Image: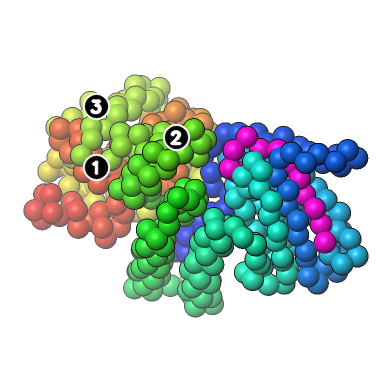
Amino acid sequence: MNLRLGNTFYASLRMTYLLFAISFLASSCSNKEVEDTSGFALKGKIANASGIKQISIQELTPGGLNMIDTGLLDASGNFNLRGKLSEKTFCILRFEKGDIVLLVDTNSQLEINIDPAHLDQYTVANSKENDELKQLYLLNNEYLRKSEEISARFTSNSTMDSKTEELIRFCFDSLQDAHKNAIKAYVGTLTNSMVPYFATTFLLPEPDLPFLEAIDKLLYANYSQSKYAIQLHQKVENLAKTADGSMAPDIVLNDPFGKTVSLSALRGKIVLVDFWASWCGPCRDENPNNVILYNKYKNAGFEIFGVSLDENRDAWIGAINKDKLLWQQGSDLQKWNSPIVSLYNIDAIPTTILVDKEGKIIARKLRGKELEAKLKEIFGF
């Protein structure tokens, strides 16, 4: 483990506002020559708007941002934006120092005041859900600030011993747990709101299935026609297929020699399914630990099944040889486009799935000391 761990968590917080698993395209309504009073209207004022000539509102989608409308600022920093939406939609206003996320209804009449130098002080008049969304934004920012402090604390040290690396992991893991608990506690106070859906995007890198199930039950009952509720419902159903206690879906791939290998063929052994890639630095950092554990427990019935998200066969084979990975390896060389990624709900690597002798999943994302402790518990030494 190295500072990439911290950078990964920091980046996951930073990118949360763009992590959506929905698919919908918003229409563009930028022509104001004819006044159209249907749809939503967003009236706003930007304080200290020097250098800002126009502003745009865009919809958040999994593929990026879809433009809805763009408006010019007058001499006092005032602007007006309009658009048509088919349902409540999460939209974004982008600024040099950050973004503001809004929940816009089909006929919203919103009024917002913004100071680009102090984005955390923006206000949206008479909008309960946008007030809730702002509080979520502020809550996330607090943990982002703490993450930056931890990063700054260690970045000055170019060489680290194992104890320092373990301390970094502990700091970030503790912060991540505190962040998740704070999000859950806040969401528990919300009623009749779509904001809990947006809160689910903060639960990274590993989804919290019980929490998602609770949000799904709430939203699907009240907003069953919403694209967000439908997407979350489908996500929960997919996650349940690879939750602890469920049978691990079979994986059938070709090894580096073109021979077919499968997870089901290892039934009767404790199997660590290791999702990795030659280009993944943290994965390569973890490989020496896996080699040690493999050599220690292989004669006791432990096996590793490597699933590579590579696309370059030579790079894949080169990494196997260099890292001395003696266990079974398979890949379809499709990188993130591999159907196995969605089958196992893989959103980052390295990711591990521990499977028992009957083929049931008993743990996810065990690495390093945690994996070592679990194997010691299973094998007794």
Give me the disc on residue 226: none
Cα separation between marks 1 and 3? 17 Å
Q: Are marks 2 and 1 in contact (CB under 8 Å)?
A: no
Q: Residues within 10 Å of mark 3 (few under 14, many from 20)?
A: some
Q: From which residue to which does the magenta span run?
A: 78-89
Please give the residue where the numbered disc 1 appears in the rendered image: 244
Q: Where residue 57 sits: x, y (%)?
A: 72, 49
Q: Residue at x 24, y 26 (%)?
A: 264
Q: Secondary structure at mark 1?
A: loop
**Side (left or right) of 21 relative to 246:** right
Above or below 121: residue 286: above
Please give the residue where the numbered disc 2 appears in the rendered image: 224
**Side (left or right) of 275 relative to 50:** left
Of label 2 and label 1, which has the lower sequence position? Answer: 2
Is 109 colored magenta in this rendering?
no
Q: Are marks 3 and 2 in contact (CB under 8 Å)?
A: no
Of label 3 and label 2, which has the lower sequence position? Answer: 2
Please give the residue where the numbered disc 3 appears in the rendered image: 264
